[in-house]
Image (cartoon, rainbow, N blue to C red):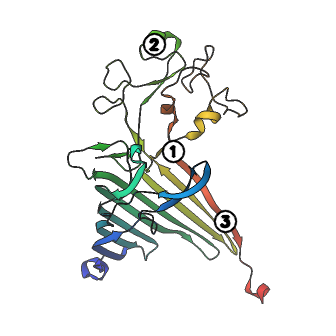
């Protein structure tokens, strides 16, 4: 760390109370898995032995004997600043972290008797910034107001998935150039309407069905190695986060609250499927949704009872939010009362 505030050319600037530059570089390992979870195990399993119940043992999971720790190398550059006798302080951080041998549950063919194995797959990059700002807005004899703001933004990217030349592994949800936890599915394009009945029929659908984008315009909705109309819709990882805490004091009273926001994340809303989102599911109650009908040709939600092979496309939604939380109101008793 280099304390710039000790330099004479900085001391001469009265508005600057403190200034420090920090640079660090490190290389660490990370196990990132629970103890013993990667070792081969046996499970007790019942079977029929000559008409009688018997118990034996079978493999419980597959183990990768060459499994290694994740290894991360990171460069961090930070600046700490103070202004106006430190009534305003700020800290800015930039980091560039590269992780190799990522520990991941890789999906494997069920013909092996298992569906996944914990192994090392490829390389992941994380680059981002973090900012913290503290201000003393008002300070009087009986009244004060302070604010704390923190902001962070991280760009996560899969650099490689371990196999040379392979850019995507759909079974594991890894796509080179895209973040981890990417959502990969058909792109929602509304609901087929009555005047689109002929076109909908060409895709094996009817008015009221969920419409998805034919990305390659070949007249069919396909999925496969060579032809695939599925695309990256978004990521479960937010693009940026920010929080702001304000604290007020008036005499012996104090009030504080936090405003928090997460922006850019996308999740699949499972509340919109099956027994919760569909009409006519027996004893279960359906959500109060704006369903498509002949008399209500909406684009909000598909029609009850119609063919919907791509209905999951409507479930991917923007999960951005702003909320107020941690509201605290307090009163400090005088020392004479406590004595």
* Label 3 Cα neighbours within 10 Å, binned few <14 / some 14-19 / many ≥20: few
Viewport quadrant of the N terminus: bottom left
**In screen coordinates, is 56 left or right of 96?**
right
Image point (58%, 35%), residue name: 272
The circle on residue 201 is: 2
Query: Is 181 located above or below residue 339 in the figure?
Result: above
How far apart are the two marked residues, 2 and 1, measured between alpha carbons?
33 Å
Of mark 3 and mark 2, the one earlier in the sequence is 2
On the image, the x and y values in percent for residue 212 come to: 43, 26
Work out how far the residue at label 1 is from the one at label 3, CA to CA, in angstroms. Answer: 27 Å
Residue displayed at 30% across by 66% down: 72
The label shown at residue 319 is: 1
Vertical arrangement, residue 75 with respect to residue 45, above or below: below
In the picture provided, is 334 more to the left or to the right than 135? right
Q: How many marks?
A: 3
Residue 49 is at least partly visible in this image: yes
Q: Mark 2 or mark 1: name the one nearer the start of the chain.
A: 2
Q: Is residue 104 visible?
A: no
| Mark 2 Cα shell of 10 Å, populated few (<14), some (14-19), many (≥20) | few
Q: Which label was assigned to residue 328?
A: 3
């Amino acid at each position: 760390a280099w304390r710039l505030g000790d330099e004479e050319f900085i001391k001469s600037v009265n508005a600057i109370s403190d200034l420090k530059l920090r640079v660090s570089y490190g290389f660490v390992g990370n196990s990132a898995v629970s103890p013993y979870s990667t070792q081969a195990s046996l499970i007790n399993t019942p079977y029929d032995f000559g008409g009688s119940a018997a118990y034996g043992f079978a493999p419980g999971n597959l183990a990768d004997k060459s499994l290694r720790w994740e290894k991360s190398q990171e460069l961090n550059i930070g600046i700490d600043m103070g202004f106006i006798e430190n009534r305003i302080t700020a800290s800015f951080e930039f980091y560039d972290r590269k992780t190799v041998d990522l520990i991941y549950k890789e999906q494997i063919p069920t013909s092996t008797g298992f569906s996944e194995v914990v192994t090392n797959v490829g390389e992941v990059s994380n680059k981002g910034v973090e900012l913290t700002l503290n201000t003393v807005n008002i300070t009087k004899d009986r009244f004060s107001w302070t604010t704390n703001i923190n902001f962070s933004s991280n760009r996560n990217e899969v650099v490689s998935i371990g196999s040379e030349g392979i850019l995507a592994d759909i079974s594991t949800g890894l796509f080179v150039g895209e973040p981890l936890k990417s959502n990969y599915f058909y792109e929602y394009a509304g609901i087929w309407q009555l005047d689109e009945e002929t076109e909908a029929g060409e895709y094996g659908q009817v008015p009221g069905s969920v419409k998805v984008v034919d990305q390659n315009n070949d007249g069919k909705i396909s999925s496969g190695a060579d032809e695939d109309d599925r695309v990256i819709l978004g990521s479960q990882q937010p693009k940026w986060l920010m929080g702001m805490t304000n604290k007020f004091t008036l005499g012996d009273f104090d009030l504080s609250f936090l405003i928090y926001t997460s922006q850019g994340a996308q999740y699949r809303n499972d509340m919109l499927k099956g027994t919760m989102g569909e009409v006519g599911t027996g004893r279960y109650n359906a959500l109060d949704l704006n369903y498509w009908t002949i008399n209500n040709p909406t684009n909000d939600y598909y029609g009850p009872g119609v063919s919907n092979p791509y209905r999951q496309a409507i479930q991917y939604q923007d999960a951005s939010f702003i909320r107020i939380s941690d509201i605290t109101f307090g009163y400090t008793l005088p020392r004479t009362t406590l004595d």
